């Protein structure tokens, strides 16, 4: 199953700090193994400079989870901006153990 970050109040407007909302979705996914994907949808209403998910800090991901958005390499629609001097998504888990 797929979890939409917007279910938690996240908006792709470059204003709302989406990090705590993403963490809520991530914690739900950790507790409910039927949900293995967090999707950040694209909002076509704003301009490209507004259409970003703002994260105030890095996010540690310590289990196997899929993070998806809209677009592709050369034409991304979903964009995630982390505050300056932050690492972004940090993936750190033991690949020899089951994620759930």
Image (cartoon, helix red, strand yellow):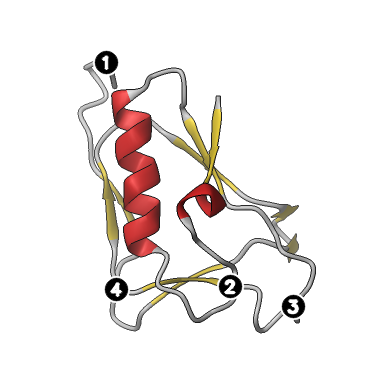
Q: Quadrant of residue 83?
A: bottom left
* Residue 38 falls left or right of residue 99: right
Residue 14 coordinates in the image, percent (x, y): 54, 79
Report the Cα–Cα distance between label 2 and label 4: 16 Å
Total residue callouts:
4
Camera-nearest residue between 2 and 92:
2
The residue pinned by badge 4 equals 86
* Residue 70 falls left or right of residue 31: right
> Mark 3 touching mark 2, by CB under 8 A?
no
Q: Which mark is residue 52?
A: 2
Q: Quadrant of residue 55?
A: bottom left
**Front tag of 1 and 2:** 2
Residue 52 coordinates in the image, percent (x, y): 58, 72
**Front tag of 2 and 4:** 2
Rendered-image quadrant of the C terminus: top left
The residue pinned by badge 1 equals 98
Q: Earlier in the sequence, mark 3 or mark 1?
A: 3
Residue 7 coordinates in the image, percent (x, y): 52, 48
Camera-nearest residue between 91 and 50:
50
Report the Cα–Cα distance between label 1 and label 2: 33 Å
């Amino acid at each position: 199953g797929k979890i939409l970050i917007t279910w938690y109040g996240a908006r792709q407007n470059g204003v709302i700090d989406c990090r705590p909302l993403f963490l809520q979705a991530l914690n739900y996914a950790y507790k409910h193994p039927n949900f293995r994907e967090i999707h950040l949808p694209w909002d076509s209403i704003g301009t490209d400079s507004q259409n970003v998910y703002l994260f105030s800090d890095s996010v540690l991901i310590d289990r196997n989870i899929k993070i998806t958005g809209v677009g592709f390499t050369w034409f991304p629609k979903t964009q995630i901006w982390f505050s300056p001097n932050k690492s972004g998504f940090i993936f750190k888990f033991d690949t020899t153990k089951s994620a759930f």
